[in-house]
Image (cartoon, rainbow, N blue to C red):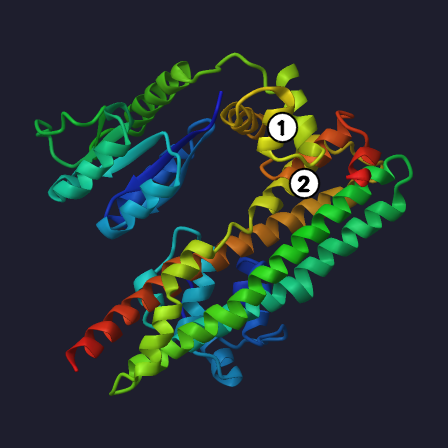
Amino acid sequence: MRATSFILYSPSYIIRKGLISIIDKMHDAHITNQADSFEEIPELIETKETDFLLLDTNILKSTNLFKEIKNKYGKNQLIAISNSSNNQNLSDFAEIINLTDSQAEILKKLNQLSGNKNKLDTAPNIPDEISKREADILKEIALGYSNKEIADKLFISVHTVVTHRKNITRKLGIKTAPGLTIYAIINKIIDINDTEAN
Amino acid sequence: MILTKNIKMADVIHMNYHTLSVLNRFGIVLGFGDKTIEETCKEKNVDVNFFLEILNAFIDKDYFPKKHLQTFSVGLITEYLSKTHAFYHQVKVPEIESLINEMVDSCYTQKDTLILLKRFFNDYKQELLNHTQREEEVVYPYTLSIEKAFNQEKIDTSIIELMETYSIDIFKTEHDDIEEKLYDLKNIIIKYLPQPKDVRLCNRLIQELFILEQDLNDHSRIEDKVLVPKIREMEKMIHQRFAKY
């Protein structure tokens, strides 16, 4: 199971702070970024891969911005923060959090969404250890080969190499090639002398 | 708790001793007696409002008055940022280095792995150095020129030429992610490194890495959310004013 990430937008400090403290109570969930104004939002949704956006309903006032959000994120990723009991025009959102909701209600809603997401994840049951094939790729990375070279060597496409790399990084929590090299040596996937030669 | 100028300096340290490194960057050192924040700042010739905002943002990661921070001068902001660079190179990095060296020296069974770790950190150190040098030699001087031009009555053509060759948005795109290697290092130690007999060194190393990471985050937040928007706004105004001539 992968950690669930949220981006939070609300002009109200009190509301942001409140939601942060509730999300902190969830297992393996966190807010990666937050915004208090419209201007900050495009940058946030551009750079970060995020599971859910928690948005104050005043976002609907900026039609263009909301259109952009809908282009990037599916309905099932959008959660509205609403302070009115009239939720008629919120059909673009998968879930609605009302300011009058209790903590338990909010947690229930968020956990449910987070649980659904994990069911949809492509590889839910693969253990965190890397597969045999991934170990082959890791070995080549650790030896210092580029994606292109690895693809040629193993008769696969560069795209496949990149996908494997992403999965390795996600499973191990190591992003850089030098970091992966150390992992490979510690786990005897390559020998320390192999790297010296390179 | 949000600090205000009448709080005693000593209480700040009692509340959060990590603030010591921030205090040092302003030239403030221990031995405060009963002096308040305001009195200490006055004595050391430090802008108390700027000091308070920087300190509060450092202590509470949810407290970030970016609009207020943007009102301070570029000189003040970049001076603080340069001081944090000096702190990394003169204090934190050497501390971490000496811990790694101690680990290498005191270990016999897995020296090879630790030497790798050491080399990895060396590469990181070089990367960090390049990163901060670029900021100090190119980016900060640029922001200071922008501020100077902004404050002058007449817009000089030289600043327009400068803005044609560089802009704060170029900095934003070339501003690489300096935290990646640090993240890897932490995970390798936390998850994979066979633990040496003496676990204390490893524990201390992890602690130091977390402190460095947090400080770097605080630092880049000031760059991304205070300096960059402030300069971007100034660039825009300069262009507008120049177009009017």
Residue A18 appears anywhere in the view: no
Q: Is residue A12 above or below residue A20?
A: below
Image mark 1: chain: A
Left or right of residue A101, residue A160 in this image: right
* Image quadrant where residue B165 sits: bottom left
Task: Give percent across and percent down for residue A180.
Answer: 66, 34
Secondary structure of the residue carrying tag 2 is helix
Reading the image, the residue beneath label 2 is: A178
Task: Give the residue at x 36% y 67%.
Answer: B69
Left or right of residue B119, residue A54 in this image: left
Task: Give percent across and percent down for residue B63.
Answer: 38, 55
Q: Give the class, few, some or many, for how many residues have Cα within 10 Å of label 1's Cα (few <14, many ≥20).
A: many
The C terminus of chain A appears in which quarter of the rendering? Answer: top right
Which dot, 1 or 2, sits closer to the camera? 1
Image mark 2: chain: A
* Image quadrant where residue A117 sits: top left
Q: Furthest residue to the bottom?
A: B153
Q: Give the class, few, some or many, for how many residues have Cα within 10 Å of label 2's Cα (few <14, many ≥20).
A: many
Q: What is the spatial separation of the Cα atoms under label 1 and label 2, in whole angstroms?
A: 16 Å
Q: Which mark is residue B212?
A: none
Q: Is residue B213 above or below residue B89?
A: above
Task: Give percent across and percent down for residue B226.
Answer: 37, 63
Reading the image, the residue beneath label 1 is: A150
* Image quadrant where residue B223 sits: bottom left
**Which residue type does callout 2 highlight?**
Pro
Q: Is residue A127 above or below residue A174?
A: above
**Which tag, 1 or 2, sits closer to the chain's start?**
1
> Do the CB atoms of the residues marked 1 and 2 lie less than 8 Å apart?
no
